[in-house]
Image (cartoon, rainbow, N blue to C red):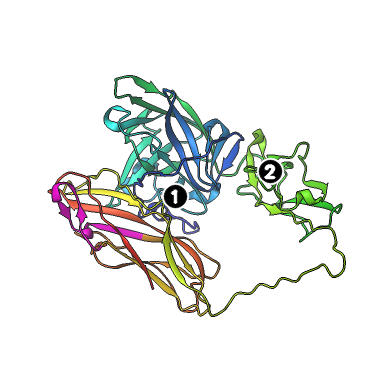
Amino acid sequence: MTDTTRTRTLASLIAGGVLVAGTLLAAQPAAAAERVVLSRGHVDAVDVHYSGGQLQLKVHDGTVEPSVERDPADVTFQVAPGAATTVPDDPRYAFLGTPGTDVWVLPQTQDPDLLWPGWNTTELGTGVFAGNQVRLSLVDVAGPGAVTLFGVNAFGDPLVRFRSSDGLPDAIDVPVGTHAHASWAFTALGEYTLKFRADATLADGTALTTGPVDYSFVVGDLTGGGTENGLTIGGLADSYQPNDTVTLRAVQSPPSELDHYHWFSRCPGATDFAIIPGEAGETYRFTATRELNACEYVVKLYGHGHGVVATSPPVTLRVADQPQQPGAAQTITASIDATQGALVVSVDPDDRSVVLPTARLNAAGDRWESQGELRPVKVTDTRSATPGWSVSGQIPADFAGPDGTTFDAGHLGWTPRVVSQGSGQGAVAGPEVAPYATGTGLGASSVLATAPDGAGRGTAELSAGLRLSVPTETPPGTYTATLTLTAI
């Protein structure tokens, strides 16, 4: 790499990248209506739906909690300046341009500082479409540079999915039930419009299409504003008496010339935040009442085109009761027993199934391979002695298939990672465990993550990329096994 001043290289952005597949088990919320800018976090940019006899493309926005479905017309995808790198001096990546030239890459594996877009067909039912698949096409790209979507196989070789520089449309066939990610590479700063289309044939032979759907991308800084604007609410006191004046103030970090806001509130019993009519300035002032006790407030900053640039975390208003007569007060004391505590490892009972995509021959043609993602694992340590901990996983029995066929659990390996953790918890992901042929696999106990002595207290969320690699003589069929997690 010729540019030593960059904090990321293309190799670091794509290392370990795999095709992620699984089944979404939870029903998704209704579509959101406002225009937003998405600059970091998980998003299924090309989310295929079938409803009322129509094939549709939506955006599944996982950057908010709870996640929402959006219309692509309401979304701007930002490729932040931190995605900048250079084309490596490696002939396998010649499709990106001349070695050493600038390229902006949203990587196939998640970087917490960047957007992580993918495509998704898990909302489609099995047996609805011929071949249980749909075709995704990139039909056009308008912008200052070229756009390429590519993956990386188990040997580190790039696999181009869509590429605008050698002519469009490009198309891939995607099985129903797929949730996949790839690297998205852009060769120049500026604004892009990508046109995607989904096509499918129903089981009765009826052809369906979404037609071209526009997706807006901005590479680099947003027009008229900086990137990744931080927004918080200032001026809130710990509590108020009825009839006190409450003055909330929107605080940008770093400051920008943007000055268009909307304020929203959500009071107890309400499900969603509602816009506060007439409040579009930096400051929101109102009178505290007991009815407003426990109401939450957020403020949103808007850029050009009325897209949401930043949203503040919610703050909660506390309004005290009217003063009581002397002698009517009570003192309540709460305490936490320092001798109590426990170490708990858990998984969501409604999100504990991993469904790998159908295995395919690897590049060498000598193994059936598939990649997937371990569902979230939570480790909570409330022990005051902070002895540290270690979480391990093992598949103690073979994968079981049809008619009594099996294959050894060691054919599955993983690459652990720490998704999130408490402040000072010190959790560290365990080492990669490769499947048989190159490693030991998960047939033996393997460390998912550890926390050192003197740390570990809090809650950490763990996960791992999964890689299955079995011999080509393995009989076809669906195989299952149980992964046992242990925390000590």
- Is 468 above or below relative to 122? below
Q: Is residue 136 above or below residue 408?
A: above
State the residue at coordinates (20%, 58%).
398
Structural distance between the alpha carbons of marks 1 and 2: 33 Å
Residue picked out by circle 1: 86
- Is residue 401 located in the magenta-colored stretch of the structure? yes
Is residue 396 toward the left or the right of residue 310 in the image? left
Mark 1 vs 2: CB contact within 8 A: no
Q: Residues within 10 Å of mark 1 (few under 14, many from 20)?
A: many
- Residue at 77 percent across and 51 percent down: it is 249
Number of numbered labels in the structure image = 2
**Which three-letter amino acid code belongs to the residue tagged 2?**
Leu
Q: Which mark is residue 301?
A: 2
- Depicted 295 relative to depicted 326: above or below: above
Asked if residue 103 can be seen in this view, the reply is no
Q: In front: mark 1 or mark 2?
A: 2
* Residue 225 on image: x %, y %: 66, 43
The residue furthest top is: 206
From the viewer's perspective, tell me whether residue 91 is left or right of residue 212: left
- What quarter of the picture does the C terminus occupy? bottom left
Name the residue at the left extreme.
Answer: 473
Counting residues from the start of the chain, the first of labels 1 and 2 encountered is 1
Viewer-proximal residue, 56 or 89? 56
Amino acid residing under circle 1: Thr
- Is label 2 in a helix, a strand or a loop? strand
The stretch drawn in magenta includes residue 235? no
| Quarter of the image that includes the N terminus | bottom left
Give the structural element (helix, strand or loop) at label 1: strand
Residue 298 rendering spot, x and y as whole percentages:
69, 47
Height in image: 146 above or below 83?
A: above
Disc 2 packing (10 Å; few <14; some 14–19; many ≥20): many
